[in-house]
Structures are given as C-alpha cells and as structure tokens.
Amino acid sequence: MNEQILIAIACLISYLLGSIPNSVWIGKAFFGVDVREHGSGNAGATNTLRVLGKPAGFTVLFLDFLKGFLAASLVFWPGLIFNTNHMMEYKMLFGALAVLGHIYPVFAGFRGGKGIATVIGVVAGMDWMLALACFFTFVVIVAITKYISVGSMLSGLISPLYAGLIHHWEEKNLVYFCMVVGVLVVYTHRSNIKRLRKGEESRFSLAKKPTQVKS
C-alpha cells in the first residue's frame, strides 16, 4: 500500500476519532440525557460537568483529550510516514481533522462541541511543552476569572507566542497552526462572547452541583 493511500486512511481515521461524541453517548447511556438539550447546549466536557456532574464531566474531558492525542500520534503508524522531515505537518493535518470531527461529528448529527479538550490533546501529541504552557495559562486565567470560555480563548490566542518562544521561532508551521487554532477557538466561542458581554456567562466552580435534568 503506497503512502498516499495510507495517509488518506489516516485522515479518515482522524476525523472519525474526533467524531466520537463522548458527552452525548455517556449522557444517553448512563443518564438518559442528551447534554445538547441542557445547559449551554454544547456537547463538550464543560457542559457535561455542568449538567451531569464531575465524574461524567472529567471522563468526557479525558476521552476528548485522548481523541486529539491519538489522532496526532497516527504518524507513528508503521509504514505511514516515509518522509520524517514532514512529521510535524502530518501531526497538524491529522489533529486538525480530529478537531473538525469533534465540532462536526458524523456520529451525532454534526452537532458537536467546541473542541478545546481535543485541541489540547492534539497539541500534547505534537509538543508536550507547548501543551503544558497552554494548560497552565488556561488554569491561571480560569482561577482568576472563573470563566472557562475566557481561559480557553486567551490560552488559544497566546499559543502562537508560546510556540515561537519554545522553538526559537524556527517551527514556523507550528506557529501558524497555533494562530489558526486561536482564531478557531474564538470562533467556536461566539455564543460565550455574547453571554460575557451581557453578563450572563456561567462562572465555573467545582463546588456547584450538576443541573437537575429529566431523562
């Protein structure tokens, strides 16, 4: 099997990995609830945490992270990448398709989440130092503002700077990739921005009890 066919298969696998709607499936299987019909209506870890509680929310967070990490790690599939000089670019390609799958999942009527946990998984699969820097920024901002959306957007927007500093501005494609990620994160948080401007955005707190929903 030639390289082009293997890469095409890896692209399909990446999208399908991203399309696994963990929040939707866990909500329906264990709670009889579609999280997209409650809370913010988002099929992601934050809304799962808000609607179904910490065990479900953190499980979804880990699984969504894992989707992105596994997609970026497909470059290590035996025989897939013949030219290792472009390994980082293939990680970006596979990771981007996983994020696309998370936002527009074929297994959930193309109604997915915002892709933050999956993006962090992709970045971790590409560069653990960059992922750690973004995660630390996210945690600090959320701790200060109590808004997960603000932490997500600001850590995404600052990620190109981190990528440049970590690699002494030599990995230009990684910097460009992070720029696209930053714009994407802001785009997927359009509704959050509107709620922030109106003062209606929910503040994050681990002490909060999950929303009571009827199955």
Image (tube, rainbow, N blue to C red):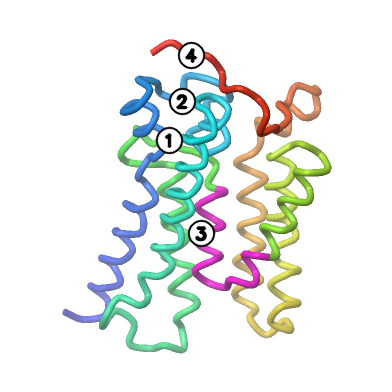
Residue type, numbered disc 3: Gly
Is-magenta flag for residue 124?
yes
Mark in the foreground, 4 or 2: 4
Q: Residue 15: x, y in percent?
A: 36, 54
> In this figure, which residue is indicated by the disc labeled 4?
213
Residue type, numbered disc 1: Ser
Q: CA distance from mark 4 to mark 2?
A: 9 Å
Q: CA distance from mark 4 to mark 3?
A: 30 Å
Q: CA distance from mark 3 to mark 2?
A: 22 Å
Which sits earlier in the primary sequence, circle 3 or circle 2?
Answer: 2
Residue at position x 68%, y 47% in the image: 152
Residue type, numbered disc 2: Val
- Say what secondary structure mark 4 lies in: loop
> In this figure, which residue is indicated by the disc labeled 1?
23
> In this figure, which residue is indicated by the disc labeled 2?
35
Give the extent of the magenta segment.
Answer: 116-132
> In this figure, which residue is indicated by the disc labeled 3?
121
Residue at position x 38%, y 22% in the image: 31
67, above or below 151, in the image = below
Q: CA distance from mark 1 to mark 3?
A: 16 Å
Residue type, numbered disc 4: Val
Q: Main secondary structure of the magenta part?
A: helix
Q: Residue 198: x, y in percent?
A: 80, 22
The reply, left or right, for residue 126 in relation to residue 63 is right
Q: Nearer the viewer, residue 15 or 59?
A: 59
Which sits earlier in the primary sequence, circle 4 or circle 2?
Answer: 2
Which sits earlier in the primary sequence, circle 1 or circle 3?
Answer: 1
